[in-house]
Image (cartoon, rainbow, N blue to C red):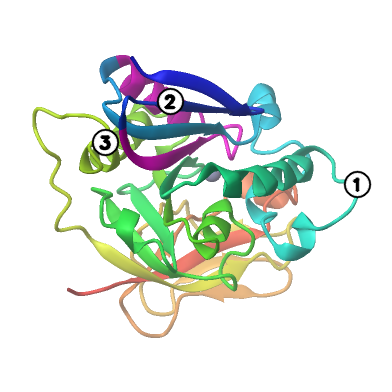
């Protein structure tokens, strides 16, 4: 039998009898993305952990309880040196500070952070920062590399990678879709079977996968007047100089050259309320 222990608030480890790696699985970094915990539940219902230690982290239980992305601000932008050192934190920041103190003590060898998206996506993808490759290669989905602090500052996985824990963010599909659960489960099965935590009847093949590089992060100029010219989905290809969106400050055009696609277009309502500063990302496919 595995041994289950509570390691902290919302943090549980399942230790098998056989020694092995320590793998972290994060759910609820965004509280309105239930596919992560649903997929984990499926895996644990159907497989015994045969070696190693699985650490399950309910990253933001307060946000999950409210079924909101965050309580007062996005925790997944708070893993910066400055914010983690700030005084008198509340809600999401208090949780980020708690995790940043506890996680280094857990001895994670790698980690997977399960998410879903507000907009539709053509295919699921894994996001990897510098240092993520050893676990990125195990994700049987499209991969987007080239992320750094300029494109996206303060994410949990970037902070983990910087602290020597190869980690990826998995964007499984649209919030509350069945496919988001299926994808997250597929990734977990691939990673866990690779490290012999579980035994699969049919091994998961991880190659070849589409691969992209993130080129630009586009932020919203004026939240209230921002409007997309049409509904975009991640990986929609952009025509040269395509008129993507507009607000009082400017027009948002695609680059003059062909070959770019849009990634994670922000939810129009969330942008207009001022809840989301990100308009979209520009990506380019890497030809292998
Ligand atoms: Zn998310």
**Pointers 2 and 3 in contact (CB under 8 A)?**
no
Q: Nearer the viewer, mark 3 or mark 1?
A: 1
Dot 3 or dot 1: first in sequence order is 1
Q: Is residue 75 visible?
A: no
Q: CA distance from mark 3 to mark 1?
A: 40 Å
Q: Residue at the spot x=85%, y=45% of the render?
A: 89
Q: SS class of the residue under badge 3?
A: helix
Callout 1: SS: loop
Exactly how many numbered labels are in the figure? 3
In the rendering, at what x and y percent does residue 268 appear? Answer: 60, 49
Q: Nearer the viewer, residue 142 or 6?
A: 6
Residue at (72, 64) in percent of width and height: 81
Crowd rating for badge 1 (residues with CA inside 10 Å; few <14, some 14–19, many 20+): few
User: Residue 52: where, in percent of width, then height?
Assistant: 34, 35
Percent x, y of residue 131:
42, 66
Mark 3 closeness class: few <14, some 14–19, many ≥20 residues within 10 Å? some
Say if the magenta span includes residue 217. Answer: no
Q: Which mark is residue 136?
A: none
Q: Which residues are magenta?
A: 19-45
Mark 2 or 3 closer to N-term?
A: 2
142, above or below 54, in the image: below
Q: Which residue is mark 3?
A: 186
The kind of secondary structure element at disc 2 is strand
Specify the label residue 14 is tagged with: 2
Q: Is residue 212 left or right of residue 105?
A: left
Q: Could you tell me residue 207's position as x and y percent? A: 14, 55
* Left or right: residue 163 compared with residue 136: right
């Amino acid at each position: 039998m595995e041994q289950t222990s509570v390691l902290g608030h919302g943090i549980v480890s399942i230790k098998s009898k056989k020694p092995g790696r320590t793998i972290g699985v994060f759910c609820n970094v965004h509280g309105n993305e239930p596919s992560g915990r649903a997929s984990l539940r499926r895996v644990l219902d159907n497989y015994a952990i045969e070696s190693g230690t699985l650490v399950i982290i309910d990253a933001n239980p307060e946000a999950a309880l409210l079924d909101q992305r965050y309580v007062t601000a996005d925790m997944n932008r708070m893993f910066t040196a400055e914010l983690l050192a700030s005084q008198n934190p509340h809600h999401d920041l208090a949780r980020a500070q708690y995790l940043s103190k506890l996680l280094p003590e857990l001895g994670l060898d790698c980690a997977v952070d399960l998410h879903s998206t507000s907009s539709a996506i053509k295919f699921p993808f894994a996001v990897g920062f510098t240092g993520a490759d050893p676990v990125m290669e195990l994700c049987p989905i499209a991969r987007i590399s080239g992320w750094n602090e300029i494109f996206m500052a303060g994410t949990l996985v970037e902070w983990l990678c910087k602290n020597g824990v190869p980690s990826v963010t998995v964007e499984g599909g649209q919030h509350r879709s069945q496919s988001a659960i299926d994808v997250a489960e597929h990734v977990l099965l691939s990673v866990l079977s690779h490290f012999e935590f579980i035994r699969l009847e049919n091994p998961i093949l991880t190659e070849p996968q589409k691969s992209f590089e993130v080129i630009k992060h586009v932020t919203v100029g004026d939240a209230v007047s921002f409007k997309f010219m049409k509904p975009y989905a991640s990986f929609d290809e952009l025509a040269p100089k395509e008129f993507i969106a507009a607000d009082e400050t400017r027009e948002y055009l695609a680059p003059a050259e062909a070959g770019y696609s849009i990634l994670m277009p922000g939810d129009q309502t969330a942008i207009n309320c001022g809840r989301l500063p990100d308009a979209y990302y520009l990506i380019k496919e890497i030809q292998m």
